[in-house]
Structures are given as structure tokens and as C-alpha cells.
């Protein structure tokens, strides 16, 4: 893999444009990629006092990014892999801290996350399990050890609450009421568009840097 020195989206004048946009500025860190991971990394780095340059060929929250889908589910159930459950718990706390910075006080909340800003939709996550389901059995144990709020629902209760489902061989389920949907691309774009507070926003600069790779055989 090598870089085409002059691909269709790249011309030497782009370099001059970026140099002009950043002229007279010094950056401590450069983050390449302004999807949800890149934007979040820049955001966290800015908390440490670092001046961050965030580069992306197509702009923040674009459809080509790995986070380019409209939504991402945040859940706590990962079978026996407790490390992922603990990571998801920490992640949701960080998301809630971000929402608190953007939302005024006094709004309705779930899991201490204010809901007036449409980045997190607490839809809940429902797991459907067969009679002998090792993964869901392990999920129950992991959720219990991690202190995650959940409900174990038997088939009759599933039918009552979710009559739209054809349960088939489903025997029981797990409901995570505090989990839901994160609007990932919106988060990346909002981080760029200036919803951050005070000095944080001034410490992050976003530039387009359209570099295209091509394979040489």
C-alpha cells in the first residue's frame, strides 16, 4: 500500500490551505480521523489541556467512517466476557458526563443521563434466550457481578410485554432497561460544531486532509 502523491481528492494547494488554516498555531497532538473514536479521543485529550488538531478527509461524522451508521447500541451483556461489560459501564458514564455538559439542568433523566439532547435513546436492550442458552446464562452471571440493573423475563411475561414478537423457541429473556442507542455520527459532528463548553472547544481544530491510498501491484 502506498499513497498516490496527487489522487483525485488531493492537490498540492490543499497543503497550502491547511498550512494557512493552522498558521501561527501550535498543537500538542494530531488525531487522524474525526469519526466517533477520533472526535472522542480529541475531546478527552482536550480535557488534559492539550491543543489538538483533528484531521479527516471527509469531515466529522461522515458516512465513510467506521462510526458512519446512524446509531450504535450500547449494552452491558457480553456473555462471560466481564471485561467488556465493565468497559461499557465506564463508557456510558463518560457519555453521560458529555450530555451533562451540553444539557441544561432540570431535564428528565435515566441512569443520571439527561435526555433533552438526542444523542442517547434509552430504548433498553432485550436478549432472547432458548431453554439451554450458555451465552445468555453467562450474561446473567456477568450482569449480577457487575451490578448492572436487569430483569429476567419468562416466556409468558415476554408475550405480555412484547406481543409483536413471534417467540418461537424462545424460553426466557433478559431486559437491560438502562441500555439503548447512541447516535454516533451526530456525536462526532456536534463535538466539531462547537457544543463543547468554554476553553475546551478552542483547544480543538478540525481540518479536512483528503489523502487517498491506492494499492501498487
Image: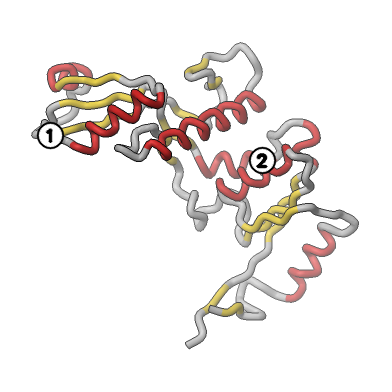
Left or right: residue 77 versus residue 36 is: left
> Looking at the image, which residue is at 61% across and 50% down?
38
> Looking at the image, which residue is at 55% across and 52% down?
62
Answer few, some or many: residues within 10 Å of disc 1's Cα (few below 14, many 20 plus, some between 14 and 19): few
Q: Is residue 185 above or below residue 170?
A: below
Q: CA distance from mark 1 to mark 2?
A: 43 Å
Viewer-nearest residue: 2 or 88: 88
Viewer-nearest residue: 62 or 137: 137
> Looking at the image, which residue is at 38% across and 36% down?
82
Q: Colour scheme of this structure image?
A: secondary structure
Determine which of the numbered discs, if any, sits on residue 132 in the image. Answer: 1
Residue 150 image offset from top left, x and y in percent: 33, 21
User: Does the CB distance between marks 1 and 2 fall below 8 Å?
Assistant: no
Q: Is residue 117 above or below residue 200?
A: above
> Looking at the image, which residue is at 73% across and 41% down?
46
Left or right: residue 141 versus residue 97 is: left
Which one is in front in this view, the residue at disc 1 or the one at disc 2? 1
Amino acid at each position: 500500500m502506498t499513497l498516490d502523491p496527487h489522487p483525485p481528492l488531493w492537490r498540492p494547494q490543499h497543503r497550502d490551505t491547511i498550512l494557512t488554516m493552522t498558521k501561527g498555531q501550535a498543537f500538542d497532538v494530531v488525531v487522524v480521523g474525526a469519526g466517533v473514536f477520533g472526535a472522542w479521543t480529541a475531546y478527552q485529550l482536550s480535557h488534559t489541556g492539550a491543543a489538538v488538531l483533528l484531521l479527516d478527509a471527509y469531515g466529522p461524522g461522515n458516512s465513510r467512517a467506521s462510526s458512519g451508521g446512524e446509531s450504535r447500541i450500547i449494552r452491558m451483556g457480553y456473555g462471560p466476557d466481564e471485561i467488556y461489560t465493565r468497559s461499557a459501564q465506564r463508557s456510558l458514564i463518560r457519555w453521560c458526563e458529555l450530555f451533562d455538559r451540553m444539557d441544561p439542568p432540570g431535564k428528565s433523566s435515566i441512569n443520571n443521563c439527561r435526555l433533552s439532547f438526542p444523542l442517547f435513546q434509552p430504548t433498553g436492550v432485550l436478549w432472547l434466550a432458548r431453554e439451554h442458552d450458555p451465552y445468555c446464562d453467562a450474561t446473567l452471571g456477568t450482569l449480577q457481578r457487575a451490578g448492572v440493573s436487569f430483569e429476567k423475563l419468562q416466556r409468558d411475561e415476554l408475550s405480555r410485554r412484547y406481543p409483536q414478537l413471534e417467540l418461537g423457541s424462545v424460553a426466557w429473556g433478559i431486559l437491560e432497561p438502562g441500555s439503548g442507542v447512541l447516535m454516533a455520527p451526530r456525536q462526532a459532528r456536534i463535538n466539531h460544531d462547537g457544543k463543547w463548553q468554554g476553553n475546551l472547544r478552542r483547544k480543538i481544530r478540525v481540518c479536512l486532509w483528503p489523502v487517498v491510498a491506492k494499492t501498487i501491484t
